[in-house]
Image (cartoon, rainbow, N blue to C red):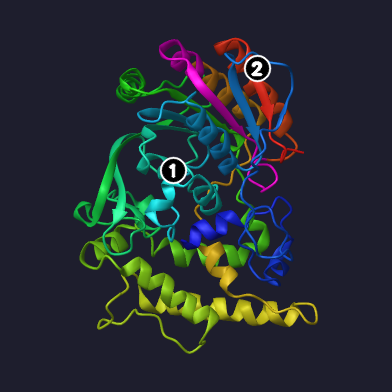
Amino acid sequence: MSQDDNARRSARANPSNGDCALGHAAPRGKRKKSTDVDIMVPPTTKKGRRVQSASPTQLQVHIVEDHDEALGPLLRGLGSKRIPFHGNILVHFDAHPDLLLPLEMPASDAFRKEALREQVSIASWILPLAYAGHLSAVVWFKAKWADQIPDGSHIIHVGRRHDTATLSTDSQLPYFVDELLSVPREALQDAKKVHLIVMTVPDDEQETFTANTTESIMAAIRDATGGLLLDVCLDFFGARNPFRAEVSSALFEELNMLFSCHSATSPPFRRLLDSSPSARADFLKDVAQILTKSPHVVMGCQSNSPCGCPVDSGVVQASLTRLRGHLKSLQAQAPEGTVVNPKRLLDIGTTTDLPHVECSECDRAGLMRNMRRWIDKVTQCKKPILVTIARSAYDGYTPSGIVDALQADVVRHVRAACGPIDLVIADTVE
């Protein structure tokens, strides 16, 4: 499991203030307090509570809390044959791509419903479906402040690695490279082709959509041999990075500097990756060793290091020295009997690039209008066969004060575009 995947899974809606959040072991399961038992609970297998009686032919709209819970109704739809087994297209409004892969999951578990549910996360629930053959295309609609993947049309392959029997992709996009998920095409077996289209949704009525990407989206929807799956995460309208609240601003910026210069988005580091593909993995290993094992380890920034370092070695060493100082300070301030967990810094460091914005009411209204325009356009081309809406408030990504209003607006737009709906609210939604 990747560092970023681990960290995203442990986000809390109620993050502690300041550095004291590091005074506990890093939790692995989503929606757990920092003192909770480290155990992952699979999404509920219940069908939730229906808001009203419904006809079997009505469009099901499922409201879930954590985004990976959308996998439940989707898998049930496949099992009941309401959703075609192959060739579906997912239209996905979200502040995050959610296109990672569970790093340690055997590829064969993509075909095992319960095993799949237990191993995916809010960041990695989509592409295993592509490997299983259920999805042939994904359209990610994002706000302008979400920059994890550039706009445009991308062809990627998801397959089983020869060496580990786990899932990876041949995409060289930094989003996948930084998560250690990118391998050469020839290293994959049983690879499935996925058409990924990324489109920025403006928050201003005066802004226009890119014509070429618009046509690519409509063509992909028309050409899909299966059904249309519509998915909305409410953090699309303004996402927070809940990890920021776990550390001080100074410590967060320190982590951001260190990890961003060792990312595939950094041109010098990208050039290093071309000659040394393991450089990112080596960097994460080095930092983990420095923070958790030996304060005397010197990071591989020397010319004879297999990892090398494309930035000034003195700058990196100074940053690591300051991080060790932060750790000592945290431990000195921690309550008696509490042990500071330095590995949490590694988890937080891999999430410093997550979107964190405070959208104005005007911006949210603009995004809602333009999302509605796209839902109208998409549904005129092909009616969805399933709609999922993730609140993402409990884990801290969607501001809790606006989530109910956003949910009501999205449901209203879906009903206006698609007609009568069967609204099902998951038991995990409070």
| Residue drawn where x is 46% and y is 47% of the image | 112
Quadrant of res 299: bottom left
Q: Secondary structure at mark 1?
A: loop
Please name the amino acid that badge 1 sits on: Asp
Please name the amino acid that badge 2 sits on: Arg
| Residue 322 in the image, given as x and y percentages of width and height | 55, 78
Most extreme residue toward the bottom is: 296
Most extreme residue toward the right is: 336
Disc 2 target residue = 412
Q: Secondary structure at mark 2?
A: helix
Q: Which residues are magenta?
A: 374-398
| Residue drawn where x is 54% and y is 80% of the image | 292
Mark yes or no: residue 265 visible.
no
Q: Nearer the viewer, residue 20 or 122?
A: 122
| Residue drawn where x is 33% and y is 17% of the image | 222
Q: Tell me if residue 227 comes above or below residue 164 in the rendering.
A: above
- Which of pointers 2 and 1 indicates the residue nearer the eye? 2
Answer with left or right where residue 253 lies relative to residue 310: right
Q: Nearer the viewer, residue 349 or 43?
A: 43
Answer with left or right where residue 213 lies relative to residue 9: left
Q: Is residue 159 magenta?
A: no
